Image (spheres, rainbow, N blue to C red):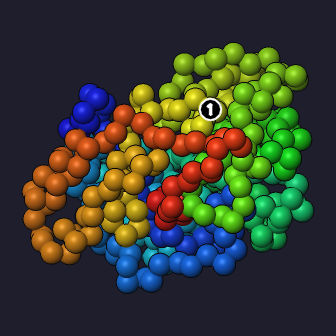
Amino acid sequence: MLIDPFKRKISYIRVSVTDRCDFRCTYCMPQKMKFLPRDNLLSLEELERLCNVFIELGVKKIRITGGEPLVRKNIMQLFKNIGKNLGNGLEELTLTTNGSQLEQYAEELFNAGVKKINISLDTLDKNKFKSITMFDNFDKVIRGIYAAKKIGMKVKINTVALKDINENEILNLVKWCGENQFTLTFIEVMPMGEMGKKRIDQFMPLSKVRSLIETNYKIVDDPLRTGGPASYVHCNETNQKIGFITPLTQNFCESCNRIRITCTGQMYMCLGQEDKEDLIKLLRDSNSNDYLKEIIYKAILRKPKGHDFVIDRNSKEQFIPRHMSTTGG
């Protein structure tokens, strides 16, 4: 079992399989993003080996991320192979996706053991979707979402709250998700990567989102915890869960149970810190999983108490140099 210096059990890993994405969301990456050479990425076999090692170390939940994970060639084989561990140490295999490839892969994912899925969707307006993502794929994403629902997946919609962009859609998103029995989670924009624009201009605190919801709906705090960073409320009128991820206004570090593995094999003990352990060299230089486990144990002892995200108009903007697509969303 992995336990950090603050007695938190590490039972959840988020594994990025690619930094590539078929969207260019304005809060996530520049339009002319320079992607990593493919040779720099962990192979699917290396990713599988690493996941198996973490399962042996007590990890119960694996989330596959990117970039957009479903654009990785032959990615379904990884899901199928990791999914064989479900019921044998692993309790949950899931992913976060933009939904663009979901219509094609929903059934295969479900059969591989993916029963829950997080889908990023910041607007229900087709034109606004294009202005946020830089691509005209709204209908394709919606078809993917309904394909996941139809096959029997529990769908959670992740919406980044964007000032002056989607704040007038908060109630529509609540209504639509309620009608479809999707969990809806709002997320504050995070200062990850240089974007050429100030994120303070995009930032909307989720206290404002909650206030907007309360103008039309009665919500009460819900004790639900999913192993992730969200706190939840229950909406009485729609009988749905609504989550809030607040890395800036109310950090979620106290109960952090997770680490992140990048597509290049870097293990980050904290999303908002730069300390990391290079696992790719270990994977390629040695066939010994025992030594790999030893290094992981030691790295977990460096896990900090929390991140230091700051977003403040009165101070110089600080951001983590790496983009979210590199670290894994």
Rendered location of residue 126, percent (x, y): 87, 60
Rendered location of residue 177, percent (x, y): 76, 39
SS for dot 1 = loop
Give the image quarter of residue 238.
top right
Task: Say which residue appears at 29% left-offset and 33% top-offset.
Answer: 9
Residue 287 is at least partly visible in this image? yes
Q: Is residue 289 left or right of residue 81?
A: left
The answer to whether 211 is drawn above or below residue 29 in the figure is above
Q: Could you say which is closer to the camera, residue 201 or residue 134? A: 201
Task: Say which residue appears at 51% left-offset and 70% top-offset.
Answer: 19
Task: Say which residue appears at 53% left-offset and 32% top-offset.
Answer: 251
Q: Could you say which is closer to the camera, residue 247 or residue 220? A: 247
Query: What is the tally of numbered marks visible in this picture?
Result: 1
The answer to whether 36 is drawn above or below residue 140 in the figure is below
Q: Is residue 219 left or right of residue 292?
A: right
Task: Say which residue appears at 48% left-offset and 41% top-offset.
Answer: 308
Residue 83 is at least partly visible in this image? no
Give the image quarter of residue 59.
top left
Rendered location of residue 324, percent (x, y): 54, 59
Counting other residues with Cα less than 10 Å from the Cα at mark 1, is it few (<14), some (14-19), or many (20 or more)?
Answer: some
Picture quarter with the N terminus:
top left
Q: Is residue 312 left or right of residue 66?
A: right
Give the image quarter of residue 157.
top right
The answer to whether 44 is drawn above or below residue 294 in the figure is below
Q: Is residue 210 left or right of residue 262?
A: right
Question: Label 1 is placed on what type of residue?
Answer: Thr
Which residue is tagged 1? 249
